[in-house]
Amino acid sequence: MQEVTTVMQWINNGIAVVILIAIGFATWRVIDWSASNIVVPLKDGALRHLDETNKALTKSADATDRLASHLDSMHDDVRDIKNNLHVVCKNNNK
């Protein structure tokens, strides 16, 4: 009877170990699948978004620089017109 109990204990422990190994393998497969089908595409999409945002910001910065250049030019033109008007007004008052 003792020998039958020992064999049953070995069988029960063996089944528990096999189930534990199967659960570990299944968990590993789920993690592997999740990494390749969920995490990697999310990372790639985020990096693509950052690249596109960087390009958009670069274009915006270039446009802002061009606008600043035109604004400086216009400011200089307005200042020249103002100075010319002062000269004309002074000449007319004499």
Image (cartoon, helix red, strand yellow):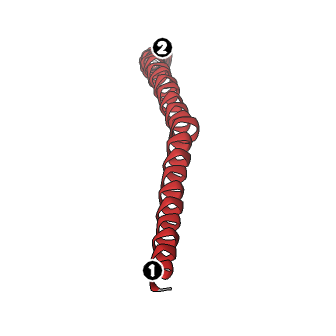
In front of the other: 85 or 9? 9
75 lies above or below 46: above
Residue 45, visible in the rendered structure: yes
45 lies above or below 2: above
The image shows residue 69 at horizontal and vertical percentages of 42, 17
Element at label 1: helix
The image shows residue 26 at horizontal and vertical percentages of 55, 51
Mark 1: which amino acid? Glu
- Report the residue that reaches farthest toward the bottom: 2
N-terminal label among 2 and 1: 1
Q: Residue at x 47, y 65 (%)?
A: 14
In front of the other: 57 or 76? 57
Mark 2: which amino acid? Val
In front of the other: 26 or 94? 26
Q: Which mark is on residue 91?
A: none
The image shows residue 15 at horizontal and vertical percentages of 53, 65
Residue 2 occupies quadrant: bottom left
Residue annotated with mark 1: 3
For marks 2 and 1, give the one nearer the viewer.
1
**Cα separation between marks 2 and 1:** 123 Å
Residue annotated with mark 2: 88
Element at label 2: helix
